Image: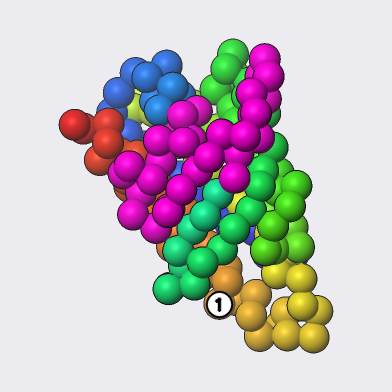
Amino acid sequence: MPSVLVSKKVSGKIDDIYQLISDMPSYPRFMPDLLSVTLLSRELNKTTTHWISNVDGRKIEWTEEDLFYPQQYRIEYQQIKGDLKKFTGYWQLAETTEGVEISLFVDFEFGIPMIAGLLNPLLKKKVRENSENMLTAIEQELCK
């Protein structure tokens, strides 16, 4: 199963950055590949959100459960329904001497075993590119 980990150091207060990352329904406002993120339910430290993304002109949809750990500056997510067989991961923030490091981990499986050997390297590249774009969009939003 392919996985991707990307990180970026940004300037700002860790609490402000965590608040921005925690507000997933706002992502389409500054992340052009996301068509929508809809909040379906909210509990104490858990949300269910429905995502629609545009990946190279193809619409991909999923519903995920998001678990929030504000004391650790961490968000874990897991697809509970959607186009991929598996889609899980986390956001993690950490203060460093150069700023706040934002890490995004994605673990995924396309779900077609016969062509996984061909598609997984392409999907991994695309997921890495998309994840890096998300971190850049967050950095740009923080600079506004």
Q: Which residue is mark 1?
A: 122
Query: Against 117, is 137 above or below?
Result: above
Residue at 66 percent of width and 85 percent of height: 118
Q: Position of residue 41 (x, y in %)?
A: 65, 28
Residue at 59 percent of width and 13 percent of height: 71
Query: Against 96, is 117 above or below?
Result: below
Scheme of image coloration:
rainbow
Q: Which residue occupies the foreground of this view, 49 or 95?
A: 49
Q: State yes or no: residue 91 in magenta.
A: no
Residues in magenta, as a range: 21-50
**How many numbered tags mark residues here?**
1
Q: State yes or no: residue 31 in magenta.
A: yes
In screen coordinates, is 77 left or right of 124?
A: right
The amino acid pointed to by label 1 is Leu
User: Which of the 4 image quadrants contains residue 113?
Assistant: bottom right
Residue at 46 percent of width and 67 percent of height: 55
Tell me if I can see residue 91 in this picture: no
